[in-house]
Image (tube, helix red, strand yellow):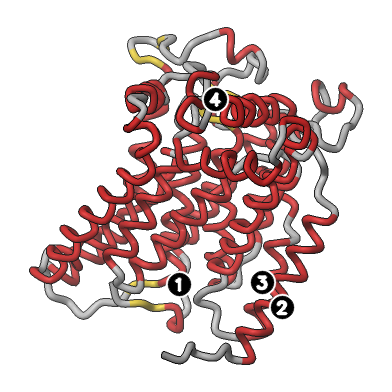
Amino acid sequence: MKLKKLSEIQKQWLLLAFMIYVTFVSMMWKWGLQGDMMFWMTWSKQIYNHGFSSVYDSGCNYLPAYLYFLYFHTKIQGNLIDIQDNLYTIKYYTFIFDMLGAFLAVWFVRDKFKKVFYFLILLFNVAYIYNTVMWAQVDAIYTFFGFAALIAALERKIIFSILLLFISLNFKLQAIVFIPVIGLILLPQIIIKEGFLKLTASFVVCILLEVFILFPFIIHGRLHQIMHVISGSVGYYPYPAVGAFNVWSIFLPSQNIESMQLITDDTKFGFISYKNIGFLLFSFTTFLAIFPLVKYLYKKYINKESEKFSLEKVFLITGLVALNFYFFNTQMHERYAHPVILLIAAFSFLSKKFFPLLLASVAYFLNLEGICWYLNLHIETYKTGLLFNPKLVAVLYLLLIGILYYHLYTEKHTKTSFIEI
């Protein structure tokens, strides 16, 4: 059987991707946020010294999927000295998913020149690559798989979409932000007989994949450690905010980001806790975000009206769900806003409205730099300066939310971006 030859366009994309990848990794900063890097180092050494299945004995609180990257890293390095000295090279693996995510963001862009141009805009957007290149975190991985699951759902690939979403959740549970929109898109496809059979098949595939992922822990009797990590993930950081410059920087004006961790999110405002206030705000704003999609599905499948939905709205709605999750809930890390950049980028590239992407990028960058201090500015700039003031950044995020809802409910969308769900 002959393999299909690559087209000229595909060859050009591969060449461009290779050149960008080599450029970035050759100039990659050889460290990251010290606290997280120390975690990677501790867990990598545990894997090297005592085996992969023993990683949770070192206090690891990540799900197993990413730990396979650390296992691969230890095997490539081969000894403890190189594991430590070359720890920064774990960024090389994550950056691949930054690039793949950027490619998916232009998936539906038709103009070939604009497709390449937007791809480069995103990869040279410091806010987008900061999480990987400067911080050395890994949110790009679950974001890519969640975004890919969304595209697969739009293209009516039920099994593929569910599998990709399942993989995303195996990296980080924060991938739940993709579930509402993907679930609504897949719903009309799975309520018919053929769709139900595909749904059943996807569950079987996911179970088999999960067994494969967990197999080293199952055979060594350590499955309970993973269950403990999952059950303990909610409430692991029981504070109003954990580095996130979100609504709690506005609601609690007397608290800076450090003093947030001196109070718990079970603290009551009147008769309701901060945690419940955040969840209610998230639930309400998420309902407002998904309502246009729910309305469309009702009109098409209940009222049997001939309807199409704006493709750019799909990315806008999903971006709003992710942003609401980050902005209103308690216990949020600054990095949980990462999917927002990719989703808003996809919206901007289709709608030609770039201000939301610019605003999201500025807010996200200021939040990340305000915690990571990569630029090594004067300490007072971070502590008391206006630029990295949590309240200012929170207001930027709030402004972004308002603008996105404005576009969702009042703006007309281009007919070329209509899609049938």
Residue 117 visible from this viewpoint: yes
Tell me the mark number nearer the camera, choosing from 1 and 3: 3
Q: Are marks 3 and 4 in contact (CB under 8 Å)?
A: no
Instruction: Say if 179 sits above or below 347 in the image.
Output: above
Q: Amino acid at mark 1?
A: Lys
Mark 1 = which residue?
412
State the residue at coordinates (42%, 71%).
311
Image position of 201 (left or right of 410): left
Tell me the mark number nearer the camera, choosing from 2 and 3: 2
- Which quadrant of the figure has residue 224? top left
As drawn, the label of residue 15 is 2
Q: Earlier in the sequence, mark 2 or mark 4?
A: 2
Q: Amino acid at mark 2?
A: Leu
Q: Earlier in the sequence, mark 1 or mark 3?
A: 3
Q: Nearer the viewer, residue 331 or 57?
A: 57
Q: Amino acid at mark 4?
A: His
Q: Residue furthest left?
A: 193
Mark 3 = which residue?
118
C-alpha span from label 1 to label 3: 22 Å
Mark 4 = which residue?
50
Task: Bin the neighbour count of mark 3 within 10 Å (Cα to Cα): few under 14, some 14-19, many 20 and up.
Answer: many
Tell me the mark number nearer the camera, choosing from 2 and 1: 2
Q: Nearer the viewer, residue 295 or 145?
A: 145
Q: Residue 97 location in percent, x, y?
A: 59, 57
C-alpha span from label 2 to label 4: 41 Å
Instruction: Say if 367 sits above or below 149 in the image.
Output: above
C-alpha span from label 1 to label 4: 59 Å
